[in-house]
Image: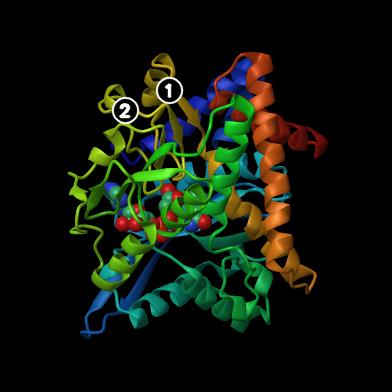
Amino acid sequence: MTEKSSMQSDYESFLHAACDRLGYSKSTLSLLSLAALEIKVEIPIIRDNGELAVFSGYRVQHQNVRGPCKGGLRYHPKVDIDEVRGLASLMTMKTALADIPLGGGKGGIRCNPRELSRRELEVLTRKFVKRIHREIGPNSDIMAPDVGTNAQVMGWIHSEYSAIYGHSPAAVTGKPLALGGSAGRDKATGHGIGIVVKTYAERYGTPLEGATVALQGFGNVGFHAAKALCDLGMKIVAVSDARSAVYHEDGVDIAALAKQKSERGLLADVDGYEALDPGAELEVECDYLVPAALDGVITKENAPRIKAGVIVEGANGPVTSEADVLLHERGITVVPDILANSGGVIVSYFEWAQNLQREVWPLKRVDDELERILTNAARHVFDHAAQAKLDLRSAAFDIAVRRVKEALDASGI
Ligand code: NAD
């Protein structure tokens, strides 16, 4: 099995354990393991150099019993059906844990967006929508940004879908504000990580002022998480992106690193910061480790070397199921992805609801509602973990799986 396919097998192992604890049947387990619909399309485009290139695109709709499928669209060279399948399943659990009326889906195009021009990316995105438009939409499946995509890509999806069906802003979230995007969506996932960390620290009585953080990934989630954690008085000692990693024991300057990355495309070479080898940022001495890049980065190989006290899963699936067991044995707490990074889908839900109701919420309303929903979800997980003597991931899965099962039962499936 390749490392990529572990995304789905990790999900299945967490799901299997939850169904065992909850006493659910094998048929429930298989229903929650399988996706309702899997689409694969080939997308030909003419490159800027006049040559034809063909890219594989995927969309997986895992469950829609609690609401339309919801989940990001990823542009990355390692996208494949197993990865998309695993990510779609996680979205079902994430929306259920947040208790918002949506299901789970995910998509991706196997490409390197860094190697495509803006025109090529636009053509690729529009053609993908042309291929799958019958299966997506405000009442069936709503895409959003993920690795390698952003508000601009969502704007193209909105435009292409609306050209077919008429103005349909609720068909996609994470759009530019000018096209009906929501205030606060851009920062939502990272901002939500701050809310979850604050709620965790309050519950477990751990001080945040001066607590140290190592962060993997400095994209949408990583950057906004860094800002939110700094606002809580925490100190970011290590940061990495795909090509570089830096460390300073007194803390790095997030604004300076963001400026340098936008000007030079690299985090490295800041005066006084130590350059780290790729992956070493996961193993530095710190209170909190926030992997916010890709899945499967904390494995049974490096888990014994992790020195953080708490891992907060900013990315989807950064800790493999085998590593999860080892970390638990070592007394390292893992705040699971379906809770930690759910701020993004919660604000996507607000965007969808605003679009359907032709409303525009001010940022304060978005922030307040996000804080309310996410704090409730986190407290529910912490309470259930304490009552049932479970780790946080098991507690979160139990709550989510139970909610999806209740909806399946109520709908007569
Ligand atoms: P992004 O494309 O904006 O950023 C990804 C970052 O990871 C970039 O800084 C990239 O350089 C870095 N990276 C890639 N490979 C790396 C490596 N090997 N080592 C270190 N850094 C590496 O993507 P994003 O939207 O920030 O998403 C990151 C993760 O968060 C993904 O797992 C995604 O599924 C998850 N997530 C995103 C959202 C969202 O709203 N964007 C919501 C929930 C979860």
Q: What residue lies at 18% left-to-right and 49% top-to-bottom?
A: 275
Lower sequence index among marks 1 and 2 = 2
Viewer-proximal residue, 102 or 59?
A: 102
Q: Secondary structure at mark 1?
A: loop
Viewer-proximal residue, 322 or 186?
A: 186
Q: Would you say 98 lies left or right of 115 here?
A: right
Q: How far apart are the two marked residues, 1 and 2, measured between alpha carbons?
A: 9 Å
Q: Position of residue 182 (x, y in %)?
A: 64, 68
Q: Position of residue 393 (x, y in %)?
A: 54, 28
Q: Position of residue 177 (x, y in %)?
A: 60, 76
Q: Would you say 9 lies left or right of 54 here?
A: right
Name above or below for residue 66 compared with residue 46: above
- Which residue type carries mark 2? Ile
Q: Quadrant of residue 323?
A: top left
What colouring does the structure picture have? rainbow
Viewer-proximal residue, 114 or 92?
A: 114
Can you identify the residue that label 2 sits on? Answer: 306
Q: Tell me, yes or no, if residue 58 can be seen here.
A: no
Viewer-proximal residue, 294 or 389?
A: 389
Q: Residues within 10 Å of mark 2 (few under 14, many from 20)?
A: many
Q: Secondary structure at mark 2?
A: loop
Name above or below for residue 378 compared with residue 398: below
Q: Quadrant of residue 318?
A: top left
- Which residue type carries mark 1? Ile
Q: What residue lies at 61% left-to-right and 14% top-to-bottom?
A: 389
Q: Position of residue 193 (x, y in %)?
A: 54, 46
Can you identify the residue that label 1 sits on? Answer: 332
Asked whether the residues under the numbered discs 1 and 2 touch, taking CB atoms below 8 Å apart as contact, a structural biologist would say: yes
